[in-house]
Amino acid sequence: MKVGVLLAQLGTPDAPTVPAVRAYLREFLGDRRVVDLPRLLWWPILHGIILRTRPKRSAALYERIWTDRGSPLLFHTEDLAAALDARLGDTATVACGMRIGSPSIAERLDNLVAQGCERLRVVPCFPQFSTATTLSIHDAIATWTKANPGAPRPELAPSFPDHPAYIAALAASVRAAGVHPTAREPLLMSFHGLPQKFVDRGDPYPQECERTALALAAALGLPADAWHMAFQSRFGAAEWIKPYADATVAAWPERGITRASVIAPSFLADCLETIDELGRELRATFLEAGGEELVRIPCLNSSPQAVDALAGVLAGEARGT
């Protein structure tokens, strides 16, 4: 049986331009999984304020990270799919798709079926489960399945917050960066944030992030005072889960911490939130507070360790530590 594997990301704009970013934000912020406010309340805010003001600023930020190959999130995920395809050989065909933007999840599933895949496996590229991200991928798969009743029904891989292969890959990336976390030069594990109300309703995301953090600290042999866990990428005025990454690093210099490193274990591929938000904005916050150096550890991207991690997830190895 020919197997098709789809690596699913939430998405990226098609270009670092105001129209492309506006189209991306319209779909992203219009997703009920991402913003679950009543439409009568949210629609005027989204269309009357946010989509009039935010695209220009966001397009400028995307322009900072855009490359000759386009969006880092897209080409890193495409490279990872190609590397995983080579690793799996004749046993599977691997592609990547975006929940928002191009290439779409539906397009890539269509391609896998057209190539004769009789079994479809979808891996949401979010190591930690969240209703705001993982279930958005599930929605896209459900829509495609309903529109293609004669096609194989996609099987969704579970989250893998402390899968041994994933944790080993993260630990290898820390070592490759040449950092040696201590109490005086700690490692910050910065996860994408989530509105607190999602957690209050039972979203397990913070617990899954903690599983990742504890497993990575154990794999690196770090004492409790050599690493910290925080959350980034707040949006809007509502309370998000804490501690916040920017507030965490801003407080460090007063405690005598002037050198540190940061890793983003909730991202498989580098993107705006890792390259610019951590590499530029968070670093600037730390330096302005009196810090001297903040080393950003790249995401796994298409490294051999990333391929090992996803191959392990697909092989169904034990996920717990």
Image: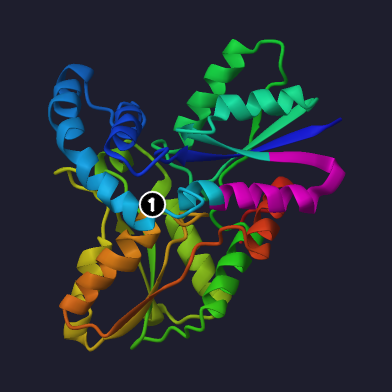
Residue that numbered label 1 is attached to: 206
- Coloured how? rainbow
Residue 163, picture quadrant: bottom right
Q: Is residue 150 left or right of residue 207?
A: right
Relative placement, left or right, of 138 versus 188 is right
Q: Position of residue 84 (x, y in %)?
A: 71, 51
Q: Residue at x 51, y 51 (%)?
A: 69
Number of callouts: 1
At 39% from the left and 39% from the top, the residue drawn is 13
Q: Is residue 184 left or right of residue 73?
A: left
Residue 166 seen in the current view: yes
Q: Provide residue 229's location: percent of width, then percent of height.
A: 36, 66
User: Is 71 situated above or below 229?
Assistant: above
Q: Amino acid at mark 1?
A: Pro
* Magenta span: chief secondary structure: helix
At horizontal 42% and vertical 41% (from top left) the residue drawn is 12
Q: Position of residue 64 (x, y in %)?
A: 33, 57
Query: Magenta residues?
Result: 76-94
Magenta span includes 202 = no
Q: Quadrant of the N terminus?
A: top right
The reply, left or right, for residue 256 in relation to residue 310 is left
Seen from the viewer's position, the closer of residues 246 and 95 is 95
In the image, 190 versus 73, the foreground residue is 73
The local crowd at label 1, few if under 14, some if 14 to 19, many if 20 or more residues have their Cα within 10 Å, is many
**Is residue 120 placed above or below 194 in the rendered structure?**
above
Find the residue positioned furthest to the front: 68
- Taking depth in this image into account, of 21 and 165 the one nearest to the observer is 21
The part of the image, by quadrant, that contains residue 148 is top right
Q: Is residue 316 visible?
A: no
Between 10 and 209, which is closer to the camera in this rendering?
10
Would you place residue 185 above or below residue 199 in this image?
A: below
